[in-house]
């Protein structure tokens, strides 16, 4: 599939990888042309060891609680974008709960601005 980049993060949110950060990750990864997934292994061998980042339920099924070490993998043709998305997810997973809420609200506000009616044709 092209280039692959991986980064290890320790989940700092006291609630673990729950619905809100999973939703943020899924939204961001939905805009990426490559594949992004989480795992408990640096080199996951089987597909069932990979938790798709475009799928909120997949990430929540991981049951990654606070203090868990997870690996963030991105595959795709654009290595720079793969590294950017892995770093963004790393930063999010490394945030404490309050920081993550602030980041979530900022992302929602940015999305609302991008949906401004002046952006539509007709």
Image (cartoon, helix red, strand yellow):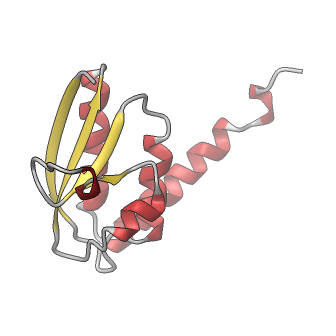
In terms of depth relative to the viewer, which is nearer, 41 or 31? 41
Q: Quadrant of residue 92?
A: bottom left
Residue 103 location, x and y as percent? Answer: 43, 57
Q: Is residue 76 left or right of residue 29?
A: left
Query: Which quadrant is home to the N terminus?
Result: top left
Total numbered labels placed on residues in the image: 0
Q: Residue at x 40, y 72 (%)?
A: 18
Q: Residue at x 79, y 28 (%)?
A: 118
**Residue 58 visible in the displayed image:** yes
Q: Residue at x 43, y 28 (%)?
A: 33
Q: Is residue 120 above or below residue 64?
A: above
Q: In the displayed orientation, state which residue is furthest to the left.
A: 42
Q: Is residue 59 left or right of residue 75?
A: right
Q: Is residue 104 left or right of residue 108?
A: left
Residue 121 location, x and y as percent? Answer: 83, 20
In terms of depth relative to the viewer, which is nearer, 111 or 73? 73
Q: Residue at x 33, y 42 (%)?
A: 36
**Residue 102 visible in the displayed image:** no
Q: Is residue 42 left or right of residue 18?
A: left
Residue 37 location, x and y as percent? Answer: 30, 48
Residue 3 location, x and y as percent? Answer: 21, 24
Q: Is residue 89 above or below residue 11?
A: above
Query: Which quadrant is home to the C terminus?
Result: top right
């Amino acid at each position: 599939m092209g280039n692959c980049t991986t980064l290890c993060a320790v989940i700092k949110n006291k609630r673990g990888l729950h619905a809100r950060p999973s939703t943020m990750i899924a939204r961001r990864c939905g805009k990426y042309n490559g594949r992004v997934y989480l795992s408990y292994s640096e080199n996951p061998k089987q597909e069932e060891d990979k938790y798709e980042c475009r799928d909120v339920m997949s990430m929540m099924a991981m049951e990654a609680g606070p203090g868990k070490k997870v690996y963030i993998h991105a595959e795709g043709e654009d290595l720079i974008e793969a590294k950017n998305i892995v770093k963004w997810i790393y930063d999010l997973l490394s945030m404490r709960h309050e920081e993550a809420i602030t980041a979530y609200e900022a992302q929602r506000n940015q999305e609302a601005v991008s949906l401004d009616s002046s952006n539509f044709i007709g």
